[in-house]
Amino acid sequence: MLNTIQLFFYITLRNWTVYKKDFISNISPTVADPALILVSLGLGLGSYLTNVEGMSYMQFLAPGLTVATALFTSFFESSYGFYVRMSYENVFKAMLTTPIGVKEVVFGELIWVGLKGALMAVGVAVVLALCGLMVNPWLIPAVAIVGCLVAVPCGAMGLLATAWVKNINQFQTVYSFLIAPLYFLSGIFFPIEQMNNIVRFIANFFPLIHGVRIAQALFWNKDILEALAFHGGILIVQSAVLCTLAYTQIRKKLIN
Amino acid sequence: MITASSLVKKFGDFKAVDELNLQINKGECFGLLGPNGAGKSTFISMTYGSVQRTSGDLTVFGYDPKTHSRDIKRRMGVVTQENALDESLTVLENMMIYCAFIGVAKDERKKRVEELLEYMNLMHKKDMPIMALSGGMKRRLVFVRALLGKPELLILDEPTTGLDPAVRHLLWGKVKELHNQGTTIVLTTHYMHEAEVLCNRLVIMNKGLVVGQGSPKELINLHTPGYVGIFSIENREQVQKIVASNNSYTLTEDTSGLYVRTNSLDELTTLHTKNNLTPLQIRPSNLEDVFLKVTGQELTADA
């Protein structure tokens, strides 16, 4: 058991080694994209929307951006990134000749996307807090929890996509029909209450909306514990289900 | 060290390994020969659990790879068929992370890696990205990777495919050295010469079945003893006439020429001196002859 945990950590370490090499270019889209959205939608569209749920549009928009960052950073890493290492570089073929097994490969990867999601969400939160969009900036470290809780299940969805696609182009389909709808229909850009009931119902089965709820609670300093307990609990259950599925599907790919 | 009995692996309806019985002993340099698709790599992957058998028995170091792959993998090193080096990392970083994977103590890692890089003449490339290495260097680095754990069992899955002769000879030297130091070696290849140079015992596989086994010498003596004279196809009529008149000759033909086999070298030189037929080549039978004979002509069709 100790051994397994150590090996998870080594997989994570490998990814960190790669990541820190190009730290600036790796971190820039995660921080720059939300900033861009904030400027274009927040300032642009925001000038027409003066009261959203009793606050400015910028304030409404801010929390969701941390969650979107966690979604993209984890999904792309475990879809395109993992796929390239698996199918083009065959890295796992060699790893599996060492004491590393599929379990370590998959969970090491998920721990990594969890950590990265936490780091990125905090990074974005810092930028947003500097813009004065966080009621209580002391809560910035807590954003790490949201980042991690969203990144892990979204990373698992990325791995499932990796197991599902027949070639790298098919990730586009996954993006268009799963990731983009999640991004746009999970209450980041407008209050989910105004959404069609069916869409709202379906959205609940995916991690993003629950992450948005927690992030909003943290940013607006409102009902934090309730949000963490309820939506956090759902995210943990979703993570458990998605990670188990990801493990069994990736195993089928790596062990014949 | 490795025992397989009635080992079967099916992919769908396709039998990649068919009722394989094998015993590989400690200290051997054992060869698995066969054309592409013969089932060699499938067998190799089964020994460390990356491919799971359909039926039959397989043990490595006395462990079943289905349930104890980690215990097995701790004691073996594998030169994988694809290099599968981590392109995002440098030479040194690649090897350091593998040291971690196989459990080399933290303060020993750097020393171990540098020793082996030195051994494979790669020290000067230590901080290079993988992309900057030539094919031969990448292959040598894969050898370094396989040796990091000081394995008792070293598996070489087509170790020299696609390499130039200089690198190939260098690697053969290293393999022999390791074998002399007591490492058990299992080698798959479709280069007969490589098997003849390195292996003390081998099996020839075709379509998942063992079609011949023994030492290179035993196999040659059993299947294609004696000598071969290769003649140009232009001399076909003349050669056919001579072979027909003397039953100590046998004749086969393929696109590269007419192969006349006989037990003594004299009989071949007679062909040359008496009949004024100039052979393209006269040589002792080798594993390639055995290979072509026991695998039949399917070789070229599937290769």
Image: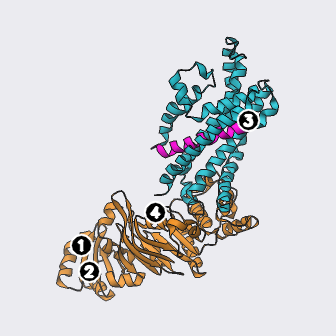
Chain colours: A cyan, B orange
How far apart are the alpha carbons under marks 2 and 4?
58 Å
Picture mark count? 4
Q: Which residue is mark 3?
A: A143
Labels 1 and 2 positioned on one and the same chain: yes
Residue type at the position of mark 3: Val
Question: Do the numbered discs 1 and 3 sit on residues whose CB atoms are within 8 Å?
Answer: no
What residue is at 20 percent from the left and 76 percent from the top? B240
Q: Which residue is mark 2?
A: B276
Q: Secondary structure at mark 4?
A: loop
Observer-nearest of B180 and A156: A156
Residue type at the position of mark 2: Asn
Labels 3 and 4 positioned on one and the same chain: no
Query: Mark number for residue B235?
Result: 1
Subunit that carries the residue with mark 3: A
Residue B85 in the magenta stretch? The answer is no
Labels 2 and 3 positioned on one and the same chain: no
Horizontal side of residue B90 vs B224, given as left or right: right
Can you tell which of label 3 and label 4 is closer to the viewer?
A: 3
For the stretch drawn in magenta, the main secondary structure is: helix
Dot 2 or dot 4: first in sequence order is 4
Can you tell which of label 2 and label 4 is closer to the viewer?
A: 4
Q: Which residue is mark 4?
A: B52
